[in-house]
Image (spheres, rainbow, N blue to C red):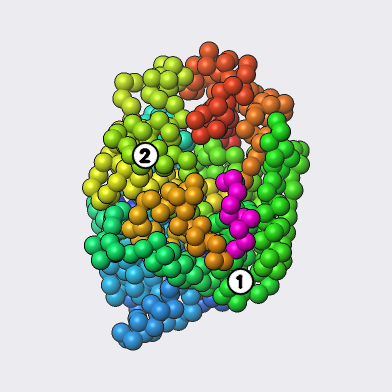
């Protein structure tokens, strides 16, 4: 829901409304229904609105509460806002609108920093306190809603996308060498606060930042769930866990139906999205719209899973829409896909989500989607080998990293690497910190709180919001994840992964969707970079701009051009697409 931007100064100067306007214009696809700019004192806020909750003008943003002396720019949705509103009304607060934005303002005034701990939802917001000059910045627990920051001297700018900050100007666009290491090693995941360029940072998830009037600030991480067994749950059986999980899933899906417009489902045909459809049907949802996308096959690899999405649509009587994308349509969509990326994202299904969202947005404004289930419930193939690990850092790196440090040094240009293995250091820190009982728990915590944020979650937000479509992810309901973190790892790893989730699914959806090979958005043309795709990537990497940048060694690029299909990462990604995507993204955004 929406896009936010703004400028805050700490030297007494007036924020640039022109810069805010440029950022807001760039964010227009995220909020095509309305726009606004408010500037007072040391801060100016901009907002692009997607009307979903309280469609009236009373809920427009930036929202100002003159009585409390607060201004807010907010992106997201607080699913439990009706309950919070009732609590605040009981405490004496009165409301002039009927949405969730005003609830955040009153909650901050009533509960201060603790307010975010009460929010169930996805959010990125910035609040200005009129009387103190303080700025409050916060992001949801999983970073579902983005927030990028650019600081220059005594001026801070923020926006829902990195390209919006670029449009405002005065950004250091030099490449961050550590972020480049993460991109090439940690499967294109660049964790906060870094981005691929030095001049833009991002607020970490589950973080509140309090910025004083002089620019000094302090961060507080307000959520870090334990990944281990609770003492009072030690006697629970597999059936007990299954029943508790089903109850939490029902609640998570139901919460994400709160809206003043219809809510649909992105239906891939996999167990996760199928389960969402089944739970909605179980709850009595009728006339549910569902959407699937498929592509041409390549190298004998099938490009769609329509057989399974059709089965679910028929079983639950959804109003189902199938989008088939021929190869020519895929090529035509790639420039728009690169434009929609706030950061370079290598996964092939970016274009799948982009094209699916384009079609869905013609029918509906809000959808539920199944992202997060694999990271939360152990669905990936790299978890079982960690069950008996005596070296969780080394074992995780072997199964997840695209390449080791020694290999990377032979591939990056001489100016872009040194002796430090930054990615392994980062992963080691996350895996070895306290709060997780077993190696599998440690890997699940890393993936659900770090990798997930800057790969699947970011991908879904960027590609859906490119078309003014809001995606809600029930598997990342924080109460559900807190429960899942306590479920014994062996219950998650059984049945080739997500065993406990499959147990729940068997109570709701047909077994044909559950007992099959794991699927995803298959885009085989991009996995086997060939024909026009090879020409596109080669052209980008051989431009004068790319050569002067010198990110990659010429001999490495020559090997990739000669035999793209022979250079596949451990996670079955194309090395050529990885390096080409980075350069095409940089060129798309004029970096």
Q: Is residue 9 visible?
A: yes
Q: Which residue is mark 1?
A: 281
Near-viewer residue (473 or 579): 473
Asked if 205 appears above or below 199 in the picture, the reply is below
**Going 51% across and 53% down the picture, which residue do you hit?**
371
Nearest to the eye among marks 2 and 1: give it: 2
Near-viewer residue (42 or 438): 438
Q: Residues within 10 Å of mark 1 (few under 14, many from 20)?
A: some
Q: Secondary structure at mark 2?
A: helix
Separation of disc 2 and disc 1 at Cα?
37 Å
The span shown in magenta is: 509-519
Please tell me whether the stretch drawn in magenta is mainly helix, strand or loop. loop
**Snapshot quadrant of residue 301:** top right
581 vs 446, left or right, is: right
Asked if 362 appears above or below 335 in the picture, the reply is below
Percent coordinates x, y for residue 573 in the rendering = 55, 32
Q: Secondary structure at mark 1?
A: helix
Q: Is residue 165 visible?
A: no
Asked if 519 appears above or below 260 in the picture, the reply is above
Near-viewer residue (10 or 436): 436
**Going 30% across and 84% down the picture, which residue do you hit?**
91
Q: Which residue is mark 2?
A: 386
558 vs 431, left or right, is: right
Residue 7 in magenta stretch: no
Percent coordinates x, y for residue 345 in the rendering = 52, 39
Percent coordinates x, y for residue 4 in the rendering = 47, 58
């Amino acid at each position: 829901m929406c896009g936010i931007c703004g400028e805050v100064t700490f030297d007494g100067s007036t924020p640039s409304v022109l810069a805010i306007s440029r950022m807001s214009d760039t964010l227009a696809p995220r909020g095509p229904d309305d726009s606004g700019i408010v500037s007072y004192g040391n801060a100016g806020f901009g907002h692009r609105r997607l009307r979903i909750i309280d469609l009236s003008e009373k809920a427009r943003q930036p929202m100002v509460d003159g009585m409390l002396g607060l201004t807010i720019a907010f992106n997201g949705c607080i699913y439990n806002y009706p309950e919070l509103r009732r609590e605040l009304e009981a405490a004496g607060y009165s409301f002039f609108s009927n949405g969730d934005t005003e609830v955040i303002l009153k909650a901050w005034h009533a509960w201060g920093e603790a307010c975010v701990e009460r929010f169930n939802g996805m959010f990125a917001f910035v609040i200005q306190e009129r009387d103190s000059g303080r700025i409050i910045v916060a992001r949801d627990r999983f970073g579902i809603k983005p927030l990028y920051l650019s600081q220059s001297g005594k001026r801070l700018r923020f926006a829902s996308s990195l390209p919006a900050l670029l449009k405002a100007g005065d950004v250091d666009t030099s490449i961050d060498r550590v972020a480049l290491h993460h991109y090439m090693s940690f499967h294109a995941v660049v964790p906060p606060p870094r981005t691929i360029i030095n001049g833009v940072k991002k607020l970490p998830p589950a973080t509140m930042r309090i910025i004083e009037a002089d620019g000094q600030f302090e961060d507080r991480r307000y959520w870090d769930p334990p990944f281990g067994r609770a003492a009072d749950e030690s006697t629970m059986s597999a059936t007990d866990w299954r029943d508790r999980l089903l109850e939490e899933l029902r609640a998570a899906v139901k919460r994400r139906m709160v809206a003043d417009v219809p809510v649909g489902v992105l239906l891939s045909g996999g167990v996760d999205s199928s389960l969402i459809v089944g739970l909605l049907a179980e709850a009595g949802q009728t006339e549910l719209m569902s959407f699937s996308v498929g592509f041409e096959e390549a190298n004998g690899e099938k490009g769609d899973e329509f057989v399974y999405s059709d089965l679910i649509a028929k079983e639950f009587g959804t109003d189902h829409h199938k989008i088939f994308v021929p190869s020519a349509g895929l090529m035509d969509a790639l420039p728009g896909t690169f434009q929609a990326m706030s950061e370079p994202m290598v996964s092939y299904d970016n274009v799948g989500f982009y094209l699916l969202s384009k079609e869905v947005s013609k029918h509906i404004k809000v959808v539920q989607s199944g992202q997060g289930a694999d990271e939360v419930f152990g669905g990936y193939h790299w978890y079982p080998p960690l069950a008996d690990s005596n070296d969780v850092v080394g074992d995780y790196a072997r199964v997840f990293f695209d390449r080791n440090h020694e290999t990377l040094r032979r591939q990056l240009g001489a100016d872009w690497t040194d002796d430090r293995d930054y990615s392994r250091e980062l992963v080691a820190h996350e895996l070895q910190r306290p709060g997780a009982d077993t190696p599998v728990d440690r890997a699940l915590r890393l993936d659900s709180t770090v990798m997930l944020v800057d790969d699947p979650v970011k991908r879904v937000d960027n590609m859906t919001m490119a078309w003014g479509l809001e995606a809600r992810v029930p598997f990342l309901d924080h109460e559900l994840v807190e429960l899942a973190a306590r479920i014994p790892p062996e219950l998650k790893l059984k049945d080739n992964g997500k065993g406990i989730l499959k147990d729940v699914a068997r109570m709701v959806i047909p077994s044909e969707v559950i007992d099959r090979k794991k699927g995803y958005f298959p885009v085989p043309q991009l996995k086997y970079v060939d024909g026009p795709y090879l020409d596109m990537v080669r052209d980008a990497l051989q431009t004068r701009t790319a050569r002067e940048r010198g990110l990659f060694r010429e001999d490495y690029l020559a090997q990739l051009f000669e035999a793209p299909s022979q250079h596949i990462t451990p996670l079955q990604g194309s090395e050529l697409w990885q390096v080409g995507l980075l350069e095409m993204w940089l060129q798309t955004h004029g970096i």
